[in-house]
Amino acid sequence: MNSDKLDGKMLLEQAEQTGIIFPTKDSWRRLQIFAGVLTCLMIIPIPLGIWIIIRARKARVGLTPEGFAFTYLTTVAYRWSDIESFTASGMSGSMYGGGLVGMATAAAVQNKTQGLKGPLYFKVKGKRNRQMIPAHTIENSLGMAIEMERLSGISFLSSEAKNQG
């Protein structure tokens, strides 16, 4: 694992120059802006609400031959050589609080989502916990995942998922 930190903002700029950038879906962005507005209505956390709105508008994933960066509330960047594995996951009812309502919500989101149906988990070498990219909120998430497979050399998509794209 490389010890020097990868600059996420620089990596996103490189990805934008090469055209390998994947913004968030408009519907997800609108939902986050709505959440920011609701936060502002509570008066005290107005700065938090404004920050959520600004960050939601800039959320995206950038890919370069060196690595990838994801920005939403914070920006994280990793080298491909630092990644141990990727796992494409579906959504479960427990993500939405469990029970019948959670299962119904997960099913509704999966039916409406084009591309990957849930988050994309990845394991960083030498780290205990998995990290996550909310791939179901990214435009052309399947194209992003195929490009990540190509650049990282790590296969994680099923053949039927690749045939969708």
Image (cartoon, grey):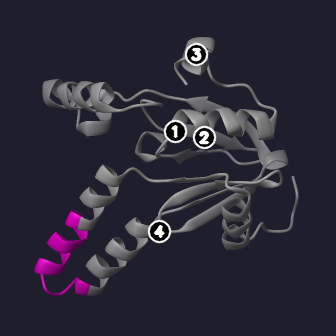
**Whole-percent x and y of residue 79?**
79, 53
Query: What quarter of the picture does the C terminus occupy?
Result: top right
Evaluate if marks 2 and 1 touch, with contact meaning CB atoms under 8 Å apart: yes
Evaluate if marks 3 and 1 touch, with contact meaning CB atoms under 8 Å apart: no
**Whole-percent x and y of residue 14?**
74, 65
Query: Which numbered disc flags the more N-terminal residue, 2 or 3?
Result: 2
Please say if 34 is above or below 123. Answer: below
Instruction: Tell whether 163 sits left or right of 12.
Output: left
**Which secondary structure, mark 1?**
helix
Q: Is residue 90 inside the magenta stretch?
A: no
State which region is magenta. 34-46
For badge 1, the amino acid type reads Ser
Disc number placed over residue 141 in the picture, else none? 1
**Which secondary structure, mark 2?**
helix
Q: Is residue 43 inside the magenta stretch?
A: yes
Instruction: Tell whether 150 sits left or right of 56.
Output: right
Read off the residue under disc 4: 58
Read off the residue under disc 2: 144
Query: Which numbered disc flags the more N-terminal residue, 3 or 1?
Result: 1
Q: Residue at x 52, y 68 (%)?
A: 74
Read off the residue under disc 3: 163
For badge 4, the amino acid type reads Lys
**Which secondary structure, mark 4?**
helix
